[in-house]
């Protein structure tokens, strides 16, 4: 099996957002791994948990600071190296062409919007789930 590492579609400009997102994902993963026994606490704090998000929506004053960021922060958490590599491989292969078409700022907005839409669909599909949602597959 051959794993693609690039595409043959040329781009007109050097991507900025794609390498930045790759670096951000790698840095977060390295920080979580380096935290050792505290890694579970990172996931518990920054992953999206559908049931907890809906409960916070019903009781906004009881939600901890930053809880509303979990749909965004969960996009930068990954379960293991294979999960991270898979997501980043596809971002690297296809992201540059999309960034070339949209421009860096609109690509970044598109990336975030797709991640938030995936989070919303996940919450809607199983609102009572306590399993944390992580990764940027959306």
Image (cartoon, grey):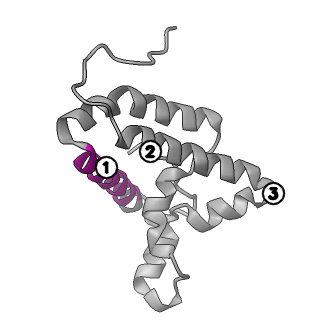
Q: Position of residue 135 (x, y in %)?
A: 50, 47
CA separation, marks 1 and 2? 9 Å
Q: Residue at x 44, y 45 (%)?
A: 21
Residue marked by disc 2: 21
Q: Nearer the viewer, mark 3 or mark 1?
A: 1
Q: Residues within 10 Å of mark 2 (few under 14, many from 20)?
A: some
Instruction: Name the residue: 50% across, 74% down.
Output: 67
**SS of the residue at dot 2?**
helix
Examine the structure image and report whether residue 118 is included in the region drawn in magenta: yes
Q: Which comes sooner in the sequence, label 3 or label 1? A: 3
- Residue at left 48%, top 40%? 22
Residue density around tag 3, few if under 14, some if 14–19, many if 20 or more, within 10 Å: few
The number of numbered discs placed on residues in the rendered structure image is: 3
Q: Earlier in the sequence, mark 1 or mark 2?
A: 2
For the residues marked 3 and 2, what is the alpha-carbon distance in whole angstroms?
A: 26 Å
> In terms of secondary structure, where does tag 1 sit?
helix
Which residue is most to the left?
Answer: 101
Q: Label 1: how many residues lie within 10 Å, few (<14), some (14-19) or many (20+)?
A: some
Q: Do residues under tags 1 and 2 come within 8 Å of each other at their CB atoms?
A: yes
* 113 w.r.t. 21: above or below: below
- Determine which quarter of the picture holds residue 93: top left
Q: Nearer the viewer, residue 31 or 123?
A: 31
- Which tag, 3 or 2, sits closer to the chain's start? 2
Classify 103 as above or below 123.
Answer: above
Report the residue marked by disc 1.
108
109 sits left or right of 138 in the view: left
C-alpha span from label 3 to label 1:
32 Å
| In the image, residue 81 above or below residue 5 | below
Circle number at residue 37: 3
Where residue 20 sits in the image (x, y, percent)?
44, 44
Instruction: Write the start and end of the magenta stretch as one range.
Output: 104-122
């Amino acid at each position: 099996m051959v794993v693609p590492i690039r595409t043959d579609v040329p781009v007109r400009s050097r991507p900025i957002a794609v390498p930045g997102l790759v670096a951000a994902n790698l840095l977060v993963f390295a920080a979580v791994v380096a935290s050792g026994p505290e890694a579970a606490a990172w996931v518990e704090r920054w992953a999206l948990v559908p049931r907890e998000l809906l409960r916070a929506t019903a009781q906004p004053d009881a939600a901890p600071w930053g809880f509303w960021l979990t749909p965004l922060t969960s996009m930068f958490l990954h379960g293991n190296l294979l999960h991270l590599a898979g997501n980043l491989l596809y971002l690297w292969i296809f992201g540059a062409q999309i960034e070339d078409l949209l421009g860096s700022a609109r690509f970044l907005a598109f990336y975030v919007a797709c991640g938030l839409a995936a989070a919303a669909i996940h919450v809607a599909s199983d609102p009572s789930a306590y399993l944390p949602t992580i990764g940027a597959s959306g």
